[in-house]
Image (cartoon, rainbow, N blue to C red):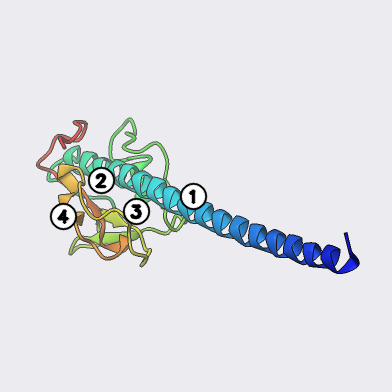
């Protein structure tokens, strides 16, 4: 083999390696994007679960109020309800927002300043746009997570799972 031919083969090998590196980069980028979407969808599912826990706890707090139903003034009141001789617990712990990963929830308040619901402070667009549980069907086509308001519904029994 002449020296010129060997030089030409090295050029083809070099181009082949460059092509392989570019292809590998594209594959890794696609895998990263798929992982990111899957992670975001899992956090959305967690937000629905956590939001439901808060809504049930708020509902339980209101339904167990002595006298007329009242919501708590602070989320911490859901952990230990001292309105009774033996404190009641409506929530195990204060869950962080799975989207923002913060404990700084947006609060839906009544006219007298009591908390009747929570929502994520995230302004990001959700992937999930349909097929919500019946209780949260109002979230359909929401443009941002902060539109998902998890409020107590005192018409439903506090401990019962929702249909749908």
Q: Are marks 1 and 4 in contact (CB under 8 Å)?
A: no
SS class, disc 3:
loop
Camera-near label (4 vs 2) is 4
**Mark 4 surroundings within 10 Å by alpha-carbon count, few (fewer than 14), some (14 through 19), many (20 or more):** some
Residue placed farthest to the right in the image?
Answer: 3
Camera-near label (3 vs 4) is 4
| Figure check: 45 above or below 158 | below
SS class, disc 1:
helix
Image-based side of 133 in relation to 72, left or right = left
| Figure check: 143 above or below 156 | below
Which one is earlier in the sequence, the residue at label 1 or at label 2? 1
Image-based side of 147 in relation to 92, left or right = left
Q: Position of residue 84 (x, y in %)?
A: 28, 35
Which one is earlier in the sequence, the residue at label 4 or at label 2? 2
| Figure check: 147 above or below 51 | below
Residue placed farthest to the front in the image?
Answer: 1
Q: CA distance from mark 3 to mark 2?
A: 14 Å
Q: Quickly name the residue at label 2.
A: 55
SS class, disc 4:
helix
């Amino acid at each position: 083999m002449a020296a010129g031919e060997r030089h030409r083969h090295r050029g083809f090998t070099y181009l082949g390696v460059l092509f392989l590196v570019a292809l590998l980069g594209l594959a890794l980028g696609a895998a990263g994007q798929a992982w990111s979407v899957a992670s975001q969808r899992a956090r959305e599912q967690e937000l629905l679960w956590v939001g439901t826990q808060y809504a049930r706890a708020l509902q339980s707090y209101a339904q167990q109020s002595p006298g007329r139903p009242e919501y708590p003034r602070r989320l911490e009141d859901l952990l230990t309800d001292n309105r009774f001789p033996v404190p009641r617990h409506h929530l195990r712990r204060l869950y962080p927002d799975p989207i923002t990963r913060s404990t700084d929830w947006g609060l839906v308040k009544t006219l007298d300043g009591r908390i009747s619901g929570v929502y994520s402070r995230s302004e990001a667009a959700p992937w999930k746009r349909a097929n919500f549980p019946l209780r949260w069907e109002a979230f359909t086509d929401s443009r941002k997570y902060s539109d998902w308001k998890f409020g107590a519904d005192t018409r439903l029994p506090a401990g019962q799972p929702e249909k749908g």
